[in-house]
Image (cartoon, rainbow, N blue to C red):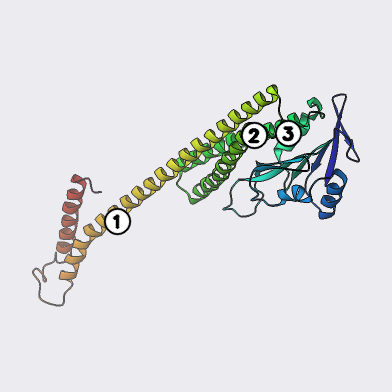
Amino acid sequence: MIQYFKNINHQIVAINKPENGAWVNVLPPLKQEEFTELSAGLDIPLDFLTDSLDIDERTRFEEDDNVKLIVFKTPTENNSFNDSDAFYITIPICIILTHNQIVTVNSFENDAIKRFLNTFQNRHPDNRKMMALKIIEKVVQTYMESLKEINHKRNLLEQKLYDANRNEELLQLMRIQKSLVYFVTALRSNELLLIKLERTNFLGLNEDEREFLNDLIVDNSQALEMANIYTNILSSTLDAFASIIANNQNEVLKRLSVITIVLTFPVLVASIYGMNVPIPYANSPFAFYIPVFLSMAISLVIGWFFLKKKLF
């Protein structure tokens, strides 16, 4: 599906065809014939439009016949039905600067484009370079919000895990860990792309726009640092819970071993008195009570010994 927007007197107006100064937004469902028509109508290389279809497309920028492409990674919620998949994944978003328009191509719906649409009335469509930087700014803000949501989920799951050690919470934490891996990888590649954009001045920015790009680099670095911190905290938490579970298991096994030892001696006494041979006090009226009390006495002595040694 292709959307066309134009900023007229600071109002967002949806139009039916691309005009000079318009924003063209391509989003799912994606059709090959739409790509072909848009490529021919705006003189855009077809591969610039289709690059976003590959979820593993790397971040980069390139230029072909004065049409500029920037591929940037943005976070999105994972709608997979697999319970072991990450909560969030990162997908490529293509920002294309044509001769008269700016085009964005998304293989999934994402919050960054929605944020940009909500502020499009404040943009200046003639300044396509600044619009591209503003889209990148919304992507970085989406990373920040997603990281805060991930950290909130992590805190809730850790609290539940403190109250009751269950596999469900551990699996949820593993999904968060996978999300953070996606974020760290994408943010690191985004940071390299932004630094390269600044060094080469690929967009031909003026002094104010370069300063804004510097701010974006700082914000992206902050998001990367947040992702690294949350990853380290989560790794430490999972390691700590693994140690706790191992210690609890050792305690249970130790108690079962002590109980087995305590019960072994009464079984031995009963076995001896159960032999089909003459035994002491066999004809005594207390023949039943003697092995019972003897077994209880031995069990109490052994139990007291283990309690004294703090082995139980």
Q: Viewer-nearest of labels 2 and 3?
A: 2
**CB atoms at circles 2 and 3 under 8 Å apart?**
no
- Closer to the camera in the image, 264 or 38: 38
Mark 2 or 3, nearer chain start: 3
Task: Relative to 160, say whether 218 is above or below.
Answer: above
Q: Which of the 4 image quarters holds residue 196?
A: top right
SS type, badge 1: helix
- Closer to the camera in the image, 284 or 59: 59
Using a 10 Å C-alpha cutoff, classify the residue at mark 3 as few (fewer than 14 neighbours), some (14 to 19) or many (20 or more).
Answer: some
Amino acid type at mark 1: Leu
SS type, badge 3: helix
Mark 3 or 1, nearer chain start: 3
Q: Viewer-nearest of labels 1 and 2?
A: 2
- For the residues labelled 1 and 2, the Cα–Cα distance comes to 69 Å
Q: Which of the 4 image quarters holds residue 150?
A: top right
Residue furthest left in the image: 280
Amino acid type at mark 2: Thr
Q: Residue at x 32, y 52 (%)?
A: 250
Q: Which mark is residue 256?
A: 1
Give coordinates of residue 235: x percent, y percent. Answer: 45, 43
- For the residues labelled 3 and 1, the Cα–Cα distance comes to 66 Å
Give coordinates of residue 68: x percent, y percent. Answer: 74, 40
Amino acid type at mark 3: Ala
Q: Which residue is mark 2?
A: 200
Give coordinates of residue 145: x percent, y percent. Answer: 62, 34
Give coordinates of residue 48: x percent, y percent. Answer: 75, 47
Q: Which mark is residue 132?
A: 3
Mark 1 or 2, nearer chain start: 2
Left or right position of 292 against 193: left
- Closer to the camera in the image, 238 or 1: 1
Using a 10 Å C-alpha cutoff, classify the residue at mark 2 as few (fewer than 14 neighbours), some (14 to 19) or many (20 or more).
Answer: few
